[in-house]
C-alpha cells in the first residue's frame, strides 16, 4: 500500500513570506513522529512518503490519485487545516484517513469526525496493526514505550519536503510540568534514551551529510551529567555539527563544566523559557525558577557564546503590561540573540485551559489561532487587542536595527545578517497585521481589535473575584 504522512500548516504559515522568515529564524527541519512511524511501515514493505507543509507546497492533487492511506499529524494550530485535508480526501477518494498527534490525543472525538481512525498517544507499537487492519477500533490507544531505545531512528529517506537540520529527541517528556505545556502531558512519564543509542543516531546524521542538528527534548539539560556525556562523546567521536540547537533551563548556568562542553560540542543555540520577571507569575505556572536564575543564565550564555532564544510568555494573569515590557527589555539587555514572545495559549488538556473554560474567558474562533501568536482568551489586565499589540511591540522593540552591532560583536557577521533579516521581517509582519486589523473584517486581527471592551472588563472582574 501507499501511505502518505502529512504535517499540515495553517494558511498563514503557507504564505511564501512566512516561509522566508522561517529560514531566517532557523534551519528547516521536520518533526520526527511521522519519520519514525513511516520508517516502521516502510520496513514492513509499504511505500511511504512524508510531507511537511510548513516547508513546501503539498502536491495534493497528485497524492489524491494514488494514495491508499493518509496519516495526518496534528497540533492545535494546524488541526483546522488537517481536518480540511481529511474532508477533501474523503470527498474525492476512497482513501482511509488516520489522525494522530498532540491535539487529537486531547480531543479524540473531535478528530474522529474527520478521520476513519484516531491514534491517541505514542504510536510506535500500534501503527502497523492499524495500517494493516488488525486494529479496527475508531479510537486506538497508543502504547507508551517503557524503554525508549526501542523506538527506531527517524527515516529521512521518506521525507519529500526540504530539510536542513536533523532532529534528535533523546528523552520523552519533561521532569517539570508547567501549567500551559502540552508535550509534558502527552509524553509522560519522563524517560531517557541511553547515551549509546543517542550517539548512534547522531552518527547516522553525520554520515548522511547534515550540517545542522536540533535536540528537540523539552529540556536537554534536565540531567546535566547525561548532557555532559553526550557532549563529550560528540567531541571525542568527531560528531560536531556547524550548529546544534537545544532547549534548556536557567539552571544550566550553575554548571561551568556543562557550559564549556556545550560550547565545544557546538550546542550554541538554546531556547530558554524566561517566561516572566514577575516571581508571582513564575510561581503560578510552576516554573521552578527565580529572577536571579534568569540573570545568571543570560550572563552565562553570553560568556560561552551560546546564542540564547529568550522565550517570554505574554498574558499571564499575574503580569501587567509593565511586567511584560520589563521582561522584553531584560531579554534585550542580556544580548539574547532572538526573542520568542509567546502569547499565553490555553491548549486543550492543560490546567490553564480548564481554568479559562471554567471562568468563561475563552474567545470564539477555531484552533488555528492556538499558535502562541494570537490572543485566544480574555486577559486579566487588558483587552485582547492590547495583549495582541504587546506581542507586536515586543517584536519591534527587540529586533531594532541598533542591536545588530552588538550581535555582530558577540557572535559574528553571519548572525548579525540574520538579525537584520529578523528586524525586517518583524516590521513587515507587524505592519501587515495592523492593516488587517483595520480593513480585513474576516481576519482574527480585525476581530481582536474590535472585540467588546465590556467583555474584557467582565473577564477582569472574574479573575479578581476568583483570587
Image: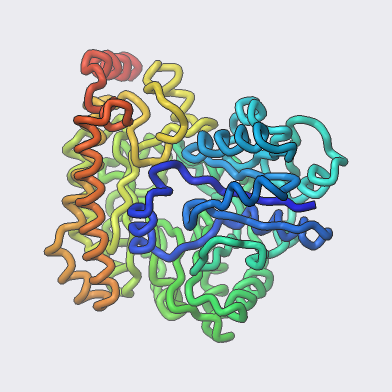
Residue drawn at the location 76% of the way across and 47% of the way down: 127
Quadrant housing residue 419? bottom left
Image height check: is 51 above or below 444? below
- Report if residue 101 is visible in the image: yes
Instruction: Depth check: give the residue in front, 396 or 430.
Output: 430
Q: From this viewpoint, is residue 119 visible? A: no
Q: Residue at x 37, y 54 (%)?
A: 16
Q: Residue at x 28, y 72 (%)?
A: 415
Quadrant of the image containing the C terminus: top left
Residue 215, relative to residue 435: is it above or below?
below
**Image point 16% across, 38% down: which residue?**
322
Q: How many discs mark residues in the rendered view? A: 0
Q: Nearer the viewer, residue 139 or 346?
A: 139
Q: Position of residue 12 (x, y in %)?
A: 38, 43
The x, y position of residue 342, in whole percent, is 34, 44
* Image coordinates for residue 99, horizontal then vertical, percent: 66, 39
Which quadrant holds residue 170?
bottom right
Is 38 placed left or right of 228 in the picture? right
- Pinpoint residue 305: horizontal percent, then vertical percent: 31, 74
Rendering colour mode: rainbow
Left or right: 154 with respect to 467? right
Amino acid at each position: 500500500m501507499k501511505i502518505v504522512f502529512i504535517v499540515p500548516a495553517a494558511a498563514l504559515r503557507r504564505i511564501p513570506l512566512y516561509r522566508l522568515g522561517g529560514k531566517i529564524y532557523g534551519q528547516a527541519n521536520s518533526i520526527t513522529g511521522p519519520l519514525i512511524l513511516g520508517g516502521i511501515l516502510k520496513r514492513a514493505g509499504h511505500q511511504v512518503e512524508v510531507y511537511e507543509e510548513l516547508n513546501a507546497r503539498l502536491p495534493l492533487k497528485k497524492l489524491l490519485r494514488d494514495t491508499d492511506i493518509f496519516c495526518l499529524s496534528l497540533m492545535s494550530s494546524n488541526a483546522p487545516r488537517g481536518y480540511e485535508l481529511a474532508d477533501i480526501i474523503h470527498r474525492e477518494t476512497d482513501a482511509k484517513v488516520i489522525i494522530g498527534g498532540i491535539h487529537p490525543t486531547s480531543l479524540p472525538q473531535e478528530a474522529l469526525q474527520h478521520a476513519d481512525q484516531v491514534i491517541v498517544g505514542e504510536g510506535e507499537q500500534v501503527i502497523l496493526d492499524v495500517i494493516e487492519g488488525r486494529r479496527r477500533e475508531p479510537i486506538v490507544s497508543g502504547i507508551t514505550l517503557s524503554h525508549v531505545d526501542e523506538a527506531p531512528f527517524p527515516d529521512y529517506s521518506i521525507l519529500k519536503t526540504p530539510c536542513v537540520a536533523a532532529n534528535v529527541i533523546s528523552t520523552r517528556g519533561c521532569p517539570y510540568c508547567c501549567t500551559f505545556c502540552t508535550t509534558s502531558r502527552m509524553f509522560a512519564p519522563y524517560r531517557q534514551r541511553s547515551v549509546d543509542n543517542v550517539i548512534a543516531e547522531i552518527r547516522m546524521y553525520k554520515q548522511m551529510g547534515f550540517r545542522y542538528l536540533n535536540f528537540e527534548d523539552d529540556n536537554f539539560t534536565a540531567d546535566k551529567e547525561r548532557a555532559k556525556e553526550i557532549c563529550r562523546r560528540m567531541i571525542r567521536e568527531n560528531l560536531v555539527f556547524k550548529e546544534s540547537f537545544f532547549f534548556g533551563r536557567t539552571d544550566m548556568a550553575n554548571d561551568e563544566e556543562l557550559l564549556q562542553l556545550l560550547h565545544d560540542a557546538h550546542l550554541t543555540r538554546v531556547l530558554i523559557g524566561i517566561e516572566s520577571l514577575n516571581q508571582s507569575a513564575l510561581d503560578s505556572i510552576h516554573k521552578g525558577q527565580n529572577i536571579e536564575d534568569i540573570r545568571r543564565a543570560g550572563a552565562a550564555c553570553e560568556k560561552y557564546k551560546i546564542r540564547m532564544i529568550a522565550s517570554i510568555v505574554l498574558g499571564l494573569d499575574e503580569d501587567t503590561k509593565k511586567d511584560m515590557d520589563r521582561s522584553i527589555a531584560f531579554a534585550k539587555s542580556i544580548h539574547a540573540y532572538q526573542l520568542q514572545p509567546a502569547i499565553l495559549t490555553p491548549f486543550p488538556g492543560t490546567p490553564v485551559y480548564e481554568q479559562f473554560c471554567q471562568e468563561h474567558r475563552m474567545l470564539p474562533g477555531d484552533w488555528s489561532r492556538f499558535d502562541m501568536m494570537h490572543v485566544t482568551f480574555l486577559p486579566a489586565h487588558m483587552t485582547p487587542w492590547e495583549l495582541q499589540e504587546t506581542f507586536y511591540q515586543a517584536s519591534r522593540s527587540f529586533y531594532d536595527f541598533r542591536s545588530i552591532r552588538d550581535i555582530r560583536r558577540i557572535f559574528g557577521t553571519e548572525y548579525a545578517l540574520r538579525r537584520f533579516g529578523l528586524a525586517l521581517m518583524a516590521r513587515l509582519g507587524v505592519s501587515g497585521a495592523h492593516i488587517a486589523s483595520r480593513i480585513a473584517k474576516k481576519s482574527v486581527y480585525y476581530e481582536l481589535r474590535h472585540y467588546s471592551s465590556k467583555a474584557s472588563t467582565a473577564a477582569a472582574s472574574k479573575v479578581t473575584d476568583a483570587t
